[in-house]
Image: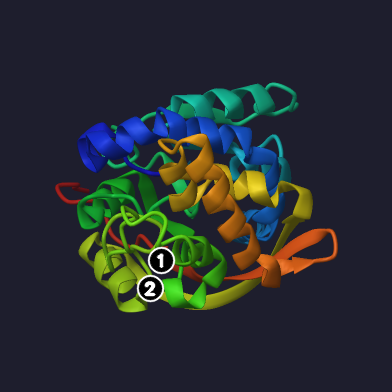
Amino acid sequence: MKGGARGEMGDEQFDFWNGAGGDAWVEMQPVLDRMLVGFEEMLAEAAVERGAERVLDVGCGAGATTLAIARRLGSGAVCTGVDISAAMIAAAKERAAYDDHPPRFLLADAATHSFGEAEFDLLVSRFGVMFFADPVAAFARLRDAVAVGGGLRFIAWRAPEENPFMTTGARAAAHLLPELPPPEPGAPGPFAFAAAGRVEEVLTGGGWTEIEVEPVDVPCAFRKADLLRYLARIGPIGQALREADDAKRAEVLDVVRAAYAPFVDGDEVRFTARCWSVEAENRRRRSGSTG
């Protein structure tokens, strides 16, 4: 679900997504797919409405959104997913092998990879474009890969305080895990685009026009039976627990499990994801183009 790589994101992020982080996302992909299916459907519908034929899914992870779009558009379309995580790209390719008209998946840094000029008519991303160290440069380069008249559509998280499901664990376990860093506004990470003004600034700097940043509140759910495993593997708690001993791990998970009780509804975990739905257009040629 990330759109940068070692040169763009730095060694720490690159190593994380090609190590424990990427492995955890592959392991939890069935849970994450169920949780985020509403966004997958939103982006697939957007591709259909635009009549897209050449789609790039930036930070595609294990390929759920890329596959959904390819299935909706059918055999006449060419869909590509790109991600920095070797484990997730491998998982995406394995899933795609069973489709009649599979998309292609590319292990690369979307911010620096040399896509063909005007290779796509639509870029999409489900939580995959918030990790660029230099987002203006990244979106400018990605625009070069989009034909004039093509578009951009992505989903990004709004502010942490609007998304308690994303932050409850870290708050509840802060006294046990003092090394947990607080979210830094605007820094690369899940909440990099929490401010609508920041999104508009970045995209304008990258040469995109007709920018629309609209709030969307999407209900999400997954099985209660998967909650503890999710908390232990994904997000800041999951990262911190990779280095914890068994006693600390059990102590933290007891505290975090209790904190998430308000999100449990019968046999399911339910929450509302408060996000931005971002649209933009490429209405001019890339720099240096002629004719």
At 54% from the left and 35% from the top, the residue drawn is 24
Counting from the top left corner in percent of width and height, residue 7 is at 21, 34
Whether the residues at callouts 2 and 1 have beta carbons within 8 Å, the answer is: yes
| Amino acid type shown at disc 2 | Glu
Counting from the top left corner in percent of width and height, residue 135 is at 25, 55
Q: Earlier in the sequence, mark 2 or mark 1?
A: 2
- Whether 229 is drawn above or below 20: the answer is below
In the picture as drawn, the residue positioned furthest to the left comes out as 288
Tell me: 164 left or right of 21: right
Q: Nearer the viewer, residue 285 or 100?
A: 100
Q: Secondary structure at mark 2?
A: strand
Tell me: 223 left or right of 184: right
CA distance for labels 2 and 1? 5 Å
Count of numbered circles in the view: 2
At 23% from the left and 33% from the top, the residue drawn is 11
Q: Nearer the viewer, residue 119 or 60?
A: 60
At 68% from the left and 55% from the top, the residue drawn is 35
In the picture as drawn, the residue positioned furthest to the right comes out as 266
| Mark 2, residue position | 210
Q: Nearer the viewer, residue 236 or 179?
A: 179
Q: Which mark is residue 280?
A: 1
| Amino acid type shown at disc 1 | Ala
At 57% from the left and 59% from the top, the residue drawn is 256
Counting from the top left corner in percent of width and height, residue 50 is at 58, 59
Q: Which mark is residue 187?
A: none
Counting from the top left corner in percent of width and height, residue 64 is at 64, 42
- Whether 107 is drawn above or below 247: the answer is above
